[in-house]
């Protein structure tokens, strides 16, 4: 065999093969780290959007209850209006016009959630008709009033310390306010 033909048909040497494998490994490693970073970034964005949606749900739900309420009351059953609990007198339901209706807002359950309890009172007997909590975890909740006497308040400020998802970080305060839209004057709503 002639030397010129042997060189043309020889193929790759072991060193060339190892170089190609090394280059391929570097390319795969870079693409995998980029893919993993993009996945983590997407996951963080999704979690952030979920928390934003939960925050909106909390604000909208509490604001809706406050707008529907007639007035702040001192208490109902074991629940009393204070800095961390709010008791509201609500309009009666159409299906039970003879029962008084109240809503209690606060951290009332065993978990770190703002809860809403609906209580009906008929003939001096209190019955819980609804219990729900908002999905957003809160470390604390505080209610502020536009009047020194909460029972005369028309504007309620809500401050919720939202649990921070970053380990070791302090809760993040979230503040909003809503007005009681109903006016009670001379017994008329």
Image: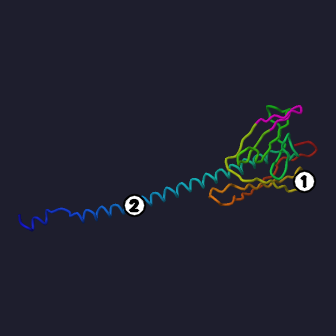
Locate the N terminus by quadrant: bottom left
Residue farthest bottom in this picture? 4
Assign a secondary structure to mark 1.
loop
Q: Nearer the viewer, mark 2 or mark 1?
A: 2
Assign a secondary structure to mark 2.
helix
- Place residue 7 in its image quadrant: bottom left
Q: Is residue 134 above or below residue 100?
A: below
Query: In the rendered structure, which disc, 2 or 1, sits on the residue that comes first in sequence?
Result: 2
- Place residue 162 in its image quadrant: bottom right
Label 2 to label 1, Cα distance in Å?
65 Å
Residue 77: image location, x then y, percent: 85, 39
Q: Which residue is mark 2?
A: 29
Q: Residues within 10 Å of mark 2 (few under 14, many from 20)?
A: few
Residue 32: image location, x then y, percent: 42, 58
Residue 41: image location, x then y, percent: 52, 58
Q: Which region shows up in magenta?
A: 119-129
Locate the C terminus by quadrant: top right
In the image, is residue 22 part of the stretch drawn in magenta?
no
Q: Residues within 10 Å of mark 1 (few under 14, many from 20)?
A: few
Q: Which residue is mark 1?
A: 149
Q: Is residue 4 left or right of residue 11?
A: left
Query: Which of the two residues, 101 or 187, is positioned nearer the viewer here?
Result: 101
The rendered magenta stretch, by its main secondary structure, is classed as strand
In the image, is residue 125 part of the stretch drawn in magenta?
yes
């Amino acid at each position: 065999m002639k030397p010129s033909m042997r060189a043309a048909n020889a193929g790759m040497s072991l060193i060339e093969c190892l170089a190609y494998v090394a280059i391929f490994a570097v390319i795969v490693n870079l693409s995998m780290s980029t893919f993993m970073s993009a996945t983590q970034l997407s996951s963080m964005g999704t979690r952030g959007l979920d928390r934003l949606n939960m925050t909106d749900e909390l604000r909208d739900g509490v604001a809706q209850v406050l707008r529907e309420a007639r007035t702040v009351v001192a208490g109902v059953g074991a629940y009393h209006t204070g800095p961390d609990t709010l008791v509201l007198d609500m309009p009666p339901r159409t299906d039970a016009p003879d029962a008084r209706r109240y809503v209690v807002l606060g951290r009332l359950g065993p978990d770190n959630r703002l809860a809403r309890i609906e209580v009906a009172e008929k003939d001096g007997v209190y019955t819980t008709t609804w219990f729900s909590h908002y999905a957003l975890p809160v470390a604390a909740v505080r209610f502020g009033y536009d009047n020194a006497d909460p029972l005369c308040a028309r504007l309620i400020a809500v401050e919720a310390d939202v649990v921070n998802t970053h380990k070791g970080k302090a809760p993040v305060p979230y503040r909003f306010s809503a007005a009681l839209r109903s006016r009670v004057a001379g017994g008329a709503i």
